[in-house]
Image (spheres, rainbow, N blue to C red):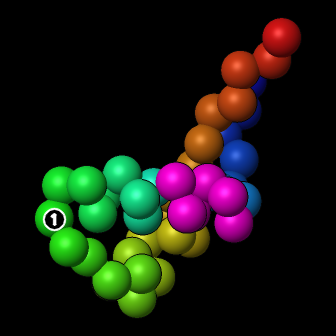
Amino acid sequence: MKPEPLTPTDCRDVLATAQRIAPVDASAFAPLWHGMRVMRRVS
């Protein structure tokens, strides 16, 4: 497995998770998207 950039679906999922904790606007996460990576499990 190697870290990959987030897809638009990943970004939506991360934002939805954060919004369950506190109200947050997508623009607040904009600077973070480029630094975030995801590890996908290979079946």
Name which residue lies at 60% across and 42% down. Answer: 38
Q: Which residue is mark 1?
A: 22
Q: Nearer the viewer, residue 1 or 13?
A: 13
| Residue 32: percent from left, percent from top | 43, 71
| Residue 17: percent from left, percent from top | 36, 52
Q: Is residue 21 visible?
A: yes
Residue at the extreme left: 22
Question: In the image, what residue type sits under mark 1?
Answer: Ala
Residue at the extreme bottom: 27
On the image, which quarter does residue 25 sit in? Answer: bottom left
Q: Nearer the viewer, residue 12 or 6?
A: 12
| Residue 21: percent from left, percent from top | 18, 55
Decide if residue 27 is on the left or right side of residue 18.
right
Was residue 12 drawn as part of the magenta stretch in this picture?
yes
Compared to residue 12, the image places residue 2 above or below, namely above
Name which residue lies at 42% across and 81% down. Answer: 26
Q: Is residue 31 visible?
A: no
Decide if residue 34 is on the left or right side of residue 1.
left
Decide if residue 31 is on the left or right side of residue 2.
left
Number of labelled discs?
A: 1
On the image, which quarter does residue 24 sit in? Answer: bottom left
Dot 1: within a 10 Å radius of its alpha carbon, few (fewer than 14), some, or many (20 or more) residues? Answer: few
Was residue 7 drawn as part of the magenta stretch in this picture?
no
Which quadrant of the rendered structure holds the C terminus?
top right
Decide if residue 17 is on the left or right side of residue 40.
left
Secondary structure, magenta segment, majority class: helix
Compared to residue 24, the image places residue 21 above or below, namely above
Compared to residue 33, the image places residue 7 above or below, namely above
Which quadrant of the rendered structure holds the N terminus?
top right
- Tag 1's secondary structure? loop
Stretch in magenta: 8-13
Residue at the extreme top: 43
